[in-house]
Amino acid sequence: MLSLRGDYSLAASDYSVEQDWGAYTGEQHALFRRLFERQSKLVPRYACPEWIAAIAGLDAGDSIPRFDSLSIKLRAKTGWEIVAVPGLIPDEAFFTHLANRRFPVTVWLRKPEEFEYIVEPDVFHDFFGHVPLLFDRVYADHLYEYGKGGLKAMRLAAVKMLARLYWYTIEFGLMKTPAGVRAYGAGLISSGGELAYCVVDPAPKRLPFNLEQALLTGYLIDRYQSTYFVIDSFEQLMRETAPDFTPIYARLRELPVLAP
Ligand code: HBI
Ligand code: FE
């Protein structure tokens, strides 16, 4: 793997590790609490209703969550569980976990100086941004299909295209609601600055979700998005990504990547 900061030395063949909850320090729990409190001021106005409904049931926030107790609640709701990982893991391991209803959550927490922004996903991004929506049946079923689709994309050498779909939905997706657009992407929900920006700023484009356009649109990882895709609902996302992507990949791979 590229030079990543996690400790991969103890990882199993599926890249899972023990969370070792006892090893977190008081300072780390306090930093997690501050991140949670910062976002808690923003989510009521900018996060989608499904995320808001789910976080209420997690009585989270006063310390770094214990993945095993999270998994018990999650399994009961949608059949998913958390798998502790040292950080970003290879695509095949990542897709295989999703295809088995296991969501990889990074065990380490950012440093205090990364309070505003962090490049790699840490436990706050994964827990606060991704885990609550795993309690939504349709979203969870879509992610399960995405995992299977990822393994297929590897066989078709189309992972780069599929990663754009993930980027513009699971990480940076917006949803239409009666009150206006709201964020459901984990990269938005867990971001101090982009969560308000993606909903209120007039600068970025907000396009109706279009699978082929999302598969073709490039993205930059180190700045706010200039293009967001807006779904009507998780049901729509599920429905529009249900077809076999094989012919779509074949057609799109000849076309140029679209600038974001
Ligand atoms: N690993 N832990 C982790 N989390 C991710 O979101 C992740 C990953 N590995 C690969 C990956 N995402 C993406 O490249 C795929 O969605 C294509
Ligand atoms: Fe993420």
Image: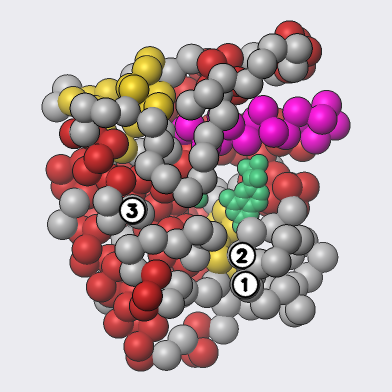
Mark with earlier residue (2, 1)? 1
Identify residue type, mark 2.
Answer: Gly
- Name the foreground residue: 63 vs 255: 255
Return the x and y of residue 128 as percentages of the image width and height. 37, 58
Q: CA distance from mark 2 to mark 1?
A: 8 Å
Instruction: Spot the residue most to the right.
Output: 155
Give the left or right position of residue 40, taking residue 245 as reference. Answer: left
Q: CA distance from mark 1 to mark 3?
A: 20 Å
Q: Report the residue marked by disc 1.
A: 5
Q: Which residue is found at the position 35% from the left and 54% from the top?
A: 190
Q: Are marks 2 and 1 in contact (CB under 8 Å)?
A: yes
> In this rendering, would 15 be left or right of 211?
right
Q: Which residues are magenta?
A: 153-169
User: Label 3: how many residues lie within 10 Å, few (<14), some (14-19) or many (20+)?
Assistant: many
Q: Residue at x 67, y 28 (%)?
A: 161
Q: Pointer 1: residues within 10 angstroms few (<14), some, or many (20+)?
A: few
Residue 179 counted in the magenta span: no
Binning the other alpha carbons within 10 Å of mark 2 as few (below 14), some (14 to 19) or many (20 upward) gives: many
> Label 3 is placed on what type of residue?
Ser
Which of the two discs, 2 and 1, sits closer to the camera? 1
Q: Quadrant of residue 86?
A: bottom right
Q: Which residue is mark 2?
A: 87
Q: Confirm whether the magenta stretch covers residue 161.
A: yes
Amino acid type assigned to the residue bearing label 1 in the image: Arg
**Does dot 2 land on a helix, a strand or a loop?**
loop
Find disc 3 in the rendering and name its residue. 191
Q: Position of residue 207 (x, y in %)?
A: 37, 17
Q: Secondary structure at mark 3?
A: loop
